[in-house]
Image (spheres, rainbow, N blue to C red):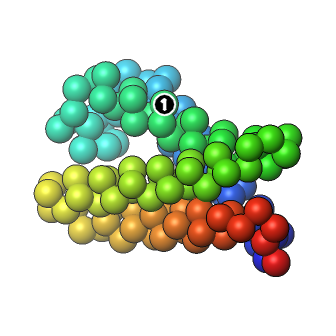
Amino acid sequence: MNTALWILQGTLAAVFLTAGLKKLLQPKEKLETKMGWVNDFDARSVKTIGLLEVLAGLVLIVPGLLQIAPLLTTWAAFGLVVLMIGAAVTHARRKEPRMIVPTLILATLAAVAALGRLDPYPL
């Protein structure tokens, strides 16, 4: 079980680090061409979402590697669940059904990681 959680956390970390860095490093105008939802938010909000994704991606991995405050990993994963639920609501409001399913899949995977890491000694 521990190996499966590490693989899941690593995958989620890669996805959210990539997505978050893209939001942090690219100007809003460039993001608008590929991410329509960006039009509904100001540049600061988009950067904040990117920062949250990067931080959560890091915290999914770093505490476990360093054996310091492993509960942070659980909280980061739960934070990603909340973030992805917000994303799903945004896509639903924008009538983008193709984007809702992947977002909810990411939320579900983050929930599995969070629940799996609640026990400090997983099976």
Q: Residue at x 40, y 62 (%)?
A: 103
Question: Residue 35 appears in which quarter of the rendering?
Answer: top left
Question: Residue 119 appears in which quarter of the rendering?
Answer: bottom right
Quick check: 114 above or below 62?
A: below
Amino acid type of disc 1? Leu
Q: Residue at x 24, y 44 (%)?
A: 37
In the rendering, at what x and y percent does residue 104 appear? 39, 68
In the rendering, at what x and y percent does residue 21 appear? 54, 32
In the rendering, at what x and y percent does residue 117 appear? 68, 63
Q: Residue at x 56, y 48 (%)?
A: 76
Can residue 29 be seen in the rendering of this structure?
Answer: no
Can residue 57 be seen in the rendering of this structure?
Answer: yes
Residue tagged 1: 51
Q: Secondary structure at mark 1?
A: helix
Quick check: 35 above or below 94?
A: above
Badge count: 1
* Crowd band around label 1 with a 10 angstrom C-alpha radius: few (<14), some (14–19), many (20+): some
- Assign the C terminus to one quadrant of the image: bottom right
Q: Foreground residue, 23 or 87?
A: 87
Question: Residue 118 appears in which quarter of the rendering?
Answer: bottom right
Compared across the picture, whether 62 is left or right of 21 comes to: right
In the rendering, at what x and y percent does residue 10 appear? 72, 55
Quick check: 61 above or below 110?
A: above
